[in-house]
Image: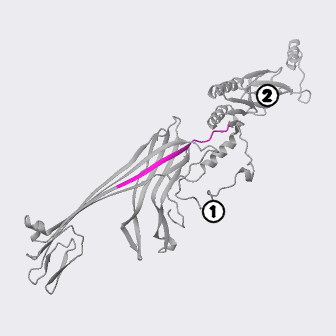
């Protein structure tokens, strides 16, 4: 029979209950659920109530002989009741977690992570999360659900992710320059009598006649199309009518390979030095820095959940421009003629797009004439010279991304046809590292199907802390304070 039963019998018989001290008997064990309450009855009036840990439970005196105990949080504590006659009663109170909440969270884990083995144990206000999930997103989702119960100890394991897809970017730079030049000039000269004369606008080199005795000689300093001379009239005419057309095409086809979400860059060109005047404590000092020029492409590929490829692309074509150069302490420092574009597109593997179809059409015309005579209608055309230059250039960039895989081991590698054998008489092929027949088999690291969440997070952190993106800082210095 319990102590409460004894008190109840004693009360019914009208006998006063004896005072019970903590040392006279073992404490009474009580169990209550979080969010639930129990009522403690005493045979005499209460004088004092004490709860050791108020965060676990609370005790409220409802009337002089009843105490209401409410469970607040999972854990253990002690409750002591003192009566007016000096008797006291000790209770060991255990507050259990509400199983309804635990079952609700377990149900959410099954519905939110279908087909994945995730379980949880709740002990001492701490949730221990165990099982195996497919990826880090599922692990974070499970930890978020379990956190509604309290502090979470994440003991989940994650399946080892597959290799990141690799994207090959095929880029074609085409710079087409079409220029046409036309010129027309007319020079007159005469050897009448003993006088040598000529008329010219000075734009083209004239014929220089000289008289030696009775002989007349002509010195031509310019390439001519037409030269006429009438000896009976002692009159000569030089006509220059030239037309030239130029066509230049510069084509670069870099192929760049990058992993999903990782930046890549390509530069084909060179570097030129230029002086930089320092400031601060070293004011006036001149240092040499280097800057790149040529064909550059920076890109960042991302494979979307749709299976398409989203590209952040920054192509650039630059060349040395000596027409805008400057002189510094006797040195000629060229400028840079640059054409570049930065854009973001999304397309399927193997699709292509064209960007930066930049056109530049320039016409330059130069007219020279002799004042007065050159303004006479019709006749004045013989005392004029005209040059017209037309320049037409176009830059076109064609980009094609493709999802690719490495060449299988043992497959024939692509090779470049060479006009002659590599190092004839010395080696039949390029030198390479000896194969397993010489070095022995290389021990392979066993592949794992799963790993702890912390290990995978550390790997992702190291990948994120890699080299900076070239899209953010395309130029880096290779000298103190230099520009690459």
Give the class, few, some or many, for how many residues have Cα within 10 Å of label 2's Cα (few <14, many ≥20): many
For residue 164: magenta? yes
Q: Is residue 94 above or below residue 207?
A: above
- Which mark is nearer the camera, 1 or 2? 1
Dot 2 corresponds to which residue? 94
Q: Is residue 452 above or below residue 26?
A: below
The scheme the figure's colours follow is one colour
The secondary structure making up most of the magenta span is strand
Closer to the camera in the image, 80 or 139: 139
Residue 159 x %, y %: 67, 36
Give the class, few, some or many, for how many residues have Cα within 10 Å of label 1's Cα (few <14, many ≥20): few
**352 on left or right of 56:** left
**180 on left or right of 467:** left
User: Disc 1 and disc 2: Cα gap in Å?
Assistant: 87 Å
For label 1, the SS is loop
Closer to the camera in the image, 415 or 75: 415
Residue 455 x %, y %: 69, 43
Q: Is residue 463 above or below residue 94?
A: below
Closer to the camera in the image, 55 or 317: 317
Q: Going 45% across and 45% down the picture, which residue do you hit? A: 344
Residue 111 x %, y %: 63, 25
Closer to the camera in the image, 119 or 236: 236
Give the mark nearest the N terminus, 1 or 2. Answer: 2
Dot 1 corresponds to which residue? 426
Extreme front residue here?
A: 425
Tag shown at residue 417: none
**93 on left or right of 418:** right
The magenta segment: 159-176
């Amino acid at each position: 029979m319990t102590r409460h039963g004894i008190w109840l019998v004693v009360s019914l018989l009208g006998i006063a209950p004896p005072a019970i001290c903590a040392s006279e008997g073992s404490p009474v064990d009580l169990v209550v659920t979080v969010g639930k309450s129990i009522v403690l009855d005493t045979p005499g009036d209460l004088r004092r109530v004490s709860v050791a840990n108020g965060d676990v439970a609370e005790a409220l005196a409802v009337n002089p002989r009843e105490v209401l105990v409410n469970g607040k949080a999972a854990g253990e504590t002690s409750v002591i009741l003192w009566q007016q006659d000096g008797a006291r009663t000790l209770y060991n109170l255990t507050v259990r977690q509400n199983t309804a909440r635990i079952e609700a969270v377990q149900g959410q884990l099954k519905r939110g992570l279908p087909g994945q083995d995730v379980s949880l144990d709740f002990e001492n206000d701490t949730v221990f999360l165990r099982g195996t999930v497919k990826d880090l997103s599922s692990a974070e989702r499970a930890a978020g659900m379990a956190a509604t119960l309290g502090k979470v100890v994440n003991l989940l394991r994650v399946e080892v992710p597959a290799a990141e897809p690799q994207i090959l970017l095929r880029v074609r730079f085409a710079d087409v320059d079409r220029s046409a030049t036309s010129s027309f000039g007319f020079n007159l000269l005469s050897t009448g009598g003993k006088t040598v004369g000529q008329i010219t606008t000075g734009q083209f080199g004239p014929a220089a006649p000289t008289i030696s005795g009775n002989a007349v000689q002509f010195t031509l300093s310019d390439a001519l199309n037409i030269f006429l001379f009438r000896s009976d009239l002692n009159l000569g005419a030089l006509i220059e009518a030239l037309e030239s057309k130029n066509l230049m095409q510069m084509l670069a086809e870099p192929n760049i390979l990058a992993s999903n979400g990782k930046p890549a860059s390509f530069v084909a060109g060179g570097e030129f030095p230029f002086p930089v005047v320092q400031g601060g404590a070293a004011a006036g000092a001149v240092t040499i820095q280097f800057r790149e020029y040529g064909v550059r492409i920076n890109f960042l590929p991302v494979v979307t959940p749709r299976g398409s490829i989203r590209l952040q692309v920054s192509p650039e074509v630059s060349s040395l421009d000596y027409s805008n150069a400057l002189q510094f302490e006797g040195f000629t420092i060229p400028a840079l003629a640059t054409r570049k574009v930065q854009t973001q597109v999304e397309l399927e593997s193997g699709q292509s797009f064209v960007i930066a179809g930049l056109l530049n059409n320039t016409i330059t015309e130069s007219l020279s004439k002799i004042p007065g005579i050159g303004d006479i209608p019709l006749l004045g055309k013989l005392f004029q010279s005209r040059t017209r230059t037309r320049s037409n250039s176009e830059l076109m960039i064609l980009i094609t991304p493709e999802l690719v895989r490495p060449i299988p081991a043992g497959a024939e590698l692509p090779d470049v046809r060479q006009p002659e054998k590599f190092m004839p008489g010395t080696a039949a092929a390029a030198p390479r590292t000896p194969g397993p027949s010489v070095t022995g088999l290389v021990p392979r690291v066993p592949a794992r199907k799963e790993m702890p969440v912390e290990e995978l997070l550390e790997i992702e952190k190291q990948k994120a802390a890699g080299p900076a993106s070239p899209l953010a800082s395309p130029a880096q210095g290779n000298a103190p304070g230099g520009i690459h």
